[in-house]
Image: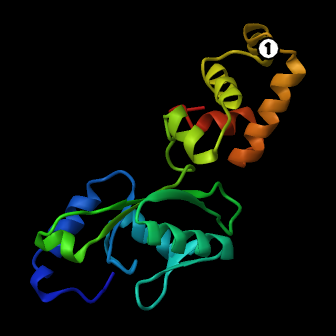
């Protein structure tokens, strides 16, 4: 990834690239205006695939879905947050997290944000709380997800919660819709190491 960099950072950029490459997720360091200045191999692969997110000639992020471009601009203006990035392939959306880098040292003056991209098709999230937050699940839907992850059936969940099985099935359908999954195995893959 060739980018224009502050000359005082030229010696630092390879080191930062090595640090980012050690991460298991796609990570990029961004300028204040959102240009990608440095990224690890996983991030470069995601951008090169152009499956919902890519880089233009000026290293600005571009999005295949117009709504994602709007959300990105809003997120960049706030300087912190997360959102889903739709994919042209139909695969589960990337989960994007933007973190501000603060301080007045040489690194944080040039690199203002850390962008972390998570591809759910390559690794599970493992955190039900993170899934709840990202997909905006209700408490009831989260309880159903936790029970499914613990190996309970719809009937067992209904009995435990004092609901009719039809209520739990309705909540399960809502989980599928919100997480863009269609089967329990896909849903559980978001929170379990191997489902």
In the rendered structure, the answer to whether residue 11 lies left or right of residue 66 reads left
Tell me which residue sits at (32%, 77%) in the image. Answer: 31
Query: Relative to 13, does residue 161 appear above or below in the rendering?
Result: above
User: Which image quarter is the C terminus in?
Assistant: top right
Tell me which residue sits at (36%, 51%) in the image. Answer: 24
Position in image of residue 168 (x %, y %)? 81, 23
In the rendered structure, the answer to whether residue 159 lies left or right of residue 101 reads right
Location of residue 7 by image quarter: bottom left
Q: Residue furthest front?
A: 78
User: Which image quarter is the N terminus in?
Assistant: bottom left
**Which residue corresponds to mark 1?**
158
Q: Can residue 96 be seen by looking at this rendering?
A: no
Query: Relative to 156, does residue 184 appear above or below in the rendering?
Result: below
Q: Can residue 57 be seen by looking at this rendering?
A: yes
In the rendered structure, the answer to whether residue 97 lies left or right of residue 9 reads right
Location of residue 18 by image quarter: bottom left
Position in image of residue 129 (x %, y %)? 52, 34
| Secondary element at tag 1 | helix
Tell me which residue sits at (54%, 32%) in the image. Answer: 128
Position in image of residue 33 (x %, y %)? 38, 81
Residue 103 versus residue 190: which sits nearer the camera? 103
């Amino acid at each position: 990834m060739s980018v224009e960099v502050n000359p005082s950072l030229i010696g630092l950029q390879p080191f930062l690239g090595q640090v980012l490459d050690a991460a298991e997720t796609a990570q990029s360091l961004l300028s204040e205006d959102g240009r990608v200045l440095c990224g690890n191999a996983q991030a470069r692969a995601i951008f090169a695939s152009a499956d919902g997110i890519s880089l233009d000639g000026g290293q600005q992020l571009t999005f295949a879905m117009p709504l994602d471009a709007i959300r990105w601009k809003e997120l960049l203006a706030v300087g912190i947050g997360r959102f889903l990035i739709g994919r042209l392939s139909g695969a589960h959306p990337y989960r994007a997290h933007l973190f501000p880098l603060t301080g007045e040292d040489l690194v944080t003056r040039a690199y203002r944000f850390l962008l972390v991209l998570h591809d759910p098709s390559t690794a599970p999230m493992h955190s039900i709380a993170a899934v709840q937050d990202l997909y905006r699940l209700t408490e009831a839907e989260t309880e159903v997800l936790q029970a499914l992850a613990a190996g309970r059936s719809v009937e067992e969940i209904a009995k435990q919660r004092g609901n009719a099985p039809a209520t739990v099935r309705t909540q399960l359908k809502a989980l599928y819709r919100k997480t863009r999954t269609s089967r329990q195995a896909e849903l559980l893959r978001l929170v379990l190491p191997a489902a």
